[in-house]
Image (cartoon, rainbow, N blue to C red):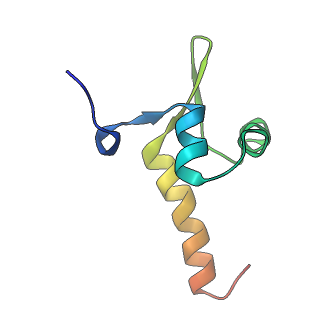
Amino acid sequence: MTVSDSEKVLWTQLEVIKNLNLGKTTIQNMTASGELPSIKIGRRRLYPVAQIMEWISTFAASDANGNA
């Protein structure tokens, strides 16, 4: 059974890089600072898709309100 990208609950770091169009170092820095939501399962760092979408929506909301 294969899960499509639209059904995934967690993204890997490479999927975050691809989907957010950001660099590896930027993602690593944002993860280390706690700015980008992530969880650690074993040795893997994974990114909850729903929380990332909420995180992105905060930027869209602040842009709509004229905030930077």
Can you name the residue that lies furthest to the top here?
Answer: 42
Q: Residue at x 80, y 41 (%)?
A: 29
Q: Quadrant of the N terminus?
A: top left
Residue 31 picture quarter: top right
Q: Residue at x 57, y 67 (%)?
A: 58
User: Residue 4 location, x and y as percent?
Assistant: 28, 37
23 on left or right of 56: right
Q: Residue at x 61, y 87 (%)?
A: 65
Does residue 14 lie above or below 17 as drawn?
above
Q: Residue at x 70, y 83 (%)?
A: 67
Q: Quadrant of the C terminus?
A: bottom right
Residue 16 picture quarter: top right
Can you name the residue that lies furthest to the bottom here?
Answer: 66
25 on left or right of 2: right
User: Residue 22 location, x and y as percent?
Assistant: 67, 51
Residue 9 picture quarter: top left
43 on left or right of 34: left
User: Residue 49 location, x and y as percent?
Assistant: 45, 44
User: Residue 48 location, x and y as percent?
Assistant: 48, 39
Which of these two is toward me, 26 or 51? 26
65 on left or right of 67: left
